[in-house]
Amino acid sequence: MSTGSLTWKEGKTQVAGADLHIIQGGTGDPILVLHDENGQTVPLRYAESLA
């Protein structure tokens, strides 16, 4: 997945016994952004500036 010059990697991880879908991109310290009930699966408009 790519938006602009940043490449995004999709994957899964497990937290407290629950499987979570994750999208990773950028460098630096990680942050966690939770989506709403619509289940947004593409990077949000502000994601590249945070990465």
Image (tube, rainbow, N blue to C red):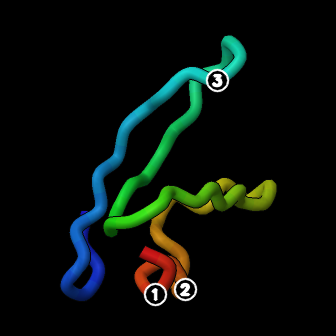
Q: Kindly identify which residue carries mark 1.
A: 49
Q: Earlier in the sequence, mark 3 or mark 1?
A: 3
Give me the C-alpha separation between circle 2 and circle 3.
25 Å
Relative placement, left or right, of 11 versus 35 is left
List the single residue furthest toward the front: 29
The residue carrying pointer 2 sits among few (fewer than 14), some (14 to 19) or many (20 or more) residues within 10 Å by Cα, namely few
Residue of label 3: 15
Label of residue 46 in the image = 2
Q: Residue at x 42, y 74 (%)?
A: 51
| Percent position of residue 22, x then y | 48, 44
Residue 32 at x, y percent in the picture: 63, 55
Q: Nearer the viewer, mark 2 or mark 1?
A: 1
Side (left or right) of 15 relative to 7 = right
Q: Secondary structure at mark 3?
A: strand
Residue 47: x %, y % from top left: 50, 77
Q: Residue at x 67, y 12 (%)?
A: 17
Q: Give neighbour class at mark 3: few <14, some 14-19, many 20+ (Cα, 10 Å).
A: few
Which amino acid does the dot numbered 1 rest on? Ser
- Asked if the residue under mark 1 is in contact with the one under mark 2, i.e. CB atoms within 8 Å, the reply is yes
Question: Callout 1: 10 Å neighbours few (<14), some, many (20+)?
Answer: few
